[in-house]
Image (cartoon, grey):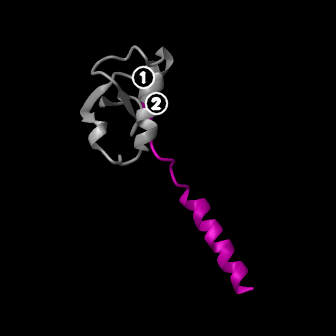
Amino acid sequence: MLCTIYKSTKKAQTYLFVKQRDDFSAVPAPLMLMFGSPTLVTVMNLAKKEKLALADIEKVKANLNEQGFYLQLPPPVENLLDQHKAEMKLKNNNND
């Protein structure tokens, strides 16, 4: 299964997978407006891949077959301050 991957010009680390190069007919218009002008990244044969870096390959294949596209969003931003506070609270509770 071939697919074409584009990156967003408006949203960092956001990628759109479509079945055919330059065919965005399955992608809803509001999504395309938010995505911006797609910039070609690569064409990939998913049949020869076992996994992808940030997406579940089976979910990508299913979405391509069912809705004609897959949108890969960036991973959530870690809140290091909250993480630090939780660690400090745990440390303080263990010292009591």
Q: Which of marks 2 and 1 is nearer the N terminus?
A: 2
Name the residue located 68 percent from the left edge and 72 percent from the top edge.
89
Assess disc 1: are there few (<14), some (14-19) or many (≥20) residues with their C-alpha within 10 Å of its C-alpha.
some
Report the residue at 37% width, 17% height from top. Answer: 24
Residue 74 screen position, x and y as percent: 45, 42
Badge number at residue 63: 2
**Quadrant in which the N terminus appears:** top left
Q: Is residue 34 visible?
A: no
Residue placed most toward the observer, 16 or 34 = 16
Residue under numbered circle 1: 68
Q: Residue 46 carries which label?
A: none
Label 2 SS: helix
Give the vertical position of 43 relative to 57 (above or below). Answer: above
In which quadrant will I find the C terminus? bottom right
Q: What range of the chain is rendered magenta?
A: 69-96
Using the image as rendered, state which of residue 42 and residue 45 is in the foreground.
Answer: 45
| Amino acid type, residue under disc 1 in the picture | Gly
